[in-house]
Image (cartoon, rainbow, N blue to C red):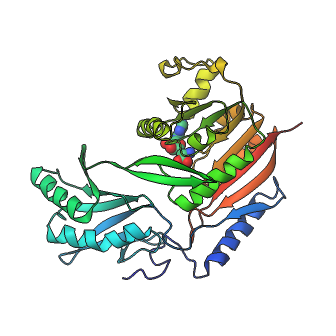
Amino acid sequence: MDCKYFGECGACRIYDSSYEMQLKDKLELNKERFSSFYSGEITTFKSPESHYRSRSEFKLWHKDDDIFYGMNHIEQKGVVLVDECPQVNTHISALMPKLLKSIKEREIGFKLFGVDFLSSSDGEIVVSLLYHRRLDEEWQIIATEMAKELNIFIIGRSRKQKVVIGQDYIREKLVIGEKEYLFNHIENSFTQPNPRVNEQMIAWALDKFSSASGDLLELYCGAGNFTIPFSKKFDKVLATEISKSSINAAKENMKLNAVENIEFVRMSVEEFVGALDGVREFRRMKEIDINSYNINSIFVDPPRSGMDEYSCQFASRYEHILYISCNPETLVRDLEILNKTHDIVDMAIFDQFPYTHHVEMGVKLLKKV
Ligand SMILES: C[S@@+](CC[C@H](N)C(=O)[O-])C[C@H]1O[C@@H](n2cnc3c(N)ncnc32)[C@H](O)[C@@H]1O
């Protein structure tokens, strides 16, 4: 039952080789995958070898009158019980047994089926407890005591119910080059899971834009993870994102970092592109004076599904394209389109998800002359 090594639940997957070996495998696989587009060196950025994840989700598994952490086995049916997890950061790792003990002692495990952890590098933690029952006042009193005892924030969630004990975010500090940035990371919203690799990605992206100037357009901006450091490099940034909670966090993060030259718009990329092309009008675009922007650089960081054809063709209008991808398979598909108008001049691999087949990639493209 003990997860003393990477691989048992399959979440860290089939690697019994060393960290260096698994990374080398990923590099070779992706060199081959992208060889028809790019033959230069792919710069590789490593992760810490353990305790690299700042967020994680577990099942709460009830068995023989006891409760355990668990994960679905990736390659076969069934749940693997987990005593400890070497992937999560040291703060989550230290909290896990204490939290479980407290849940059992305080008897709030009834119909509790999941627990999500979100932690800052300094150890601020939001724990989400997921229930199949309504949370009443008694639950709130007990959860408040538990939050105090463990020095954490707790969110109780059940159908159509969210009870916040303390706050629903943590504050993360990222160091990019010489500069420090602060970010509120909101529970249940997208954040990069591996902060040390994230810092390297942002630094790489800033460096790849070193010859760019004017204003920047960013698609899929989340809570401003790249946008805020980019705002130091460009005159102005126009950034779009579909999620309301992420856009609200992005605006808050702008204030936290005393930045003023970003306009965040809550819109899907498809809506945004349609609005710029005059296909449809959007109230949310009314306040944006697009003609005041001098954009020749675009940054995209889409979800695993990548971009659609129309959005790729839209991105092709710009001189500089920087594409961060968490799925090499959809990246290959999108590069088939982008490569018609642009040359791929640089690539990088960021090992965000060690010991899995997943990898984050960065691609710099310049318009063909
Ligand atoms: C991989 S995350 C990147 C977020 C951000 N760049 C970061 O580093 O934290 C992708 C983001 O795209 C957003 N998203 C997904 N589909 C979208 C769409 N169709 N239009 C705009 N944003 C979308 C998600 O909400 C998510 O925040």
Q: Is residue 304 left or right of residue 9?
A: right
Could you tell me residue 308's position as x and y percent?
Answer: 63, 39
Q: How many marks?
A: 0
Could you tell me residue 283's position as x and y percent?
Answer: 48, 18
Q: Residue at x 20, y 78 (%)?
A: 64
Position of the N terminus, as image quadrant, is: bottom left
Q: Residue at x 59, y 60 (%)?
A: 197
Q: Is residue 330 visible?
A: no
Where 342 sits versus 142, above or below? Answer: above
Q: Is residue 34 visible?
A: yes
Position of the C terminus, as image quadrant, is: top right
Could you tell me residue 74's position as x and y percent?
Answer: 47, 69
Q: Residue furthest front?
A: 178
Q: Residue furthest left?
A: 138
Where 189 sits versus 311, above or below? Answer: below
Instruction: Answer with the quarter of the image where residue 35 lies.
Output: bottom right
Q: Is residue 136 left or right of residue 82?
A: left
Could you tell me residue 15's position as x and y percent?
Answer: 58, 78
Q: Of residues 109 and 94, which is closer to you in this image?
A: 94
Q: Of residues 326 and 105, which is closer to you in this image?
A: 105
Instruction: Answer with the quarter of the image where residue 84 lies.
Output: bottom left
Q: Residue at x 56, y 18 (%)?
A: 280
Instruction: Answer with the quarter of the image where residue 234 lies.
Output: top right
Q: Of residues 206 and 63, which is closer to you in this image?
A: 206
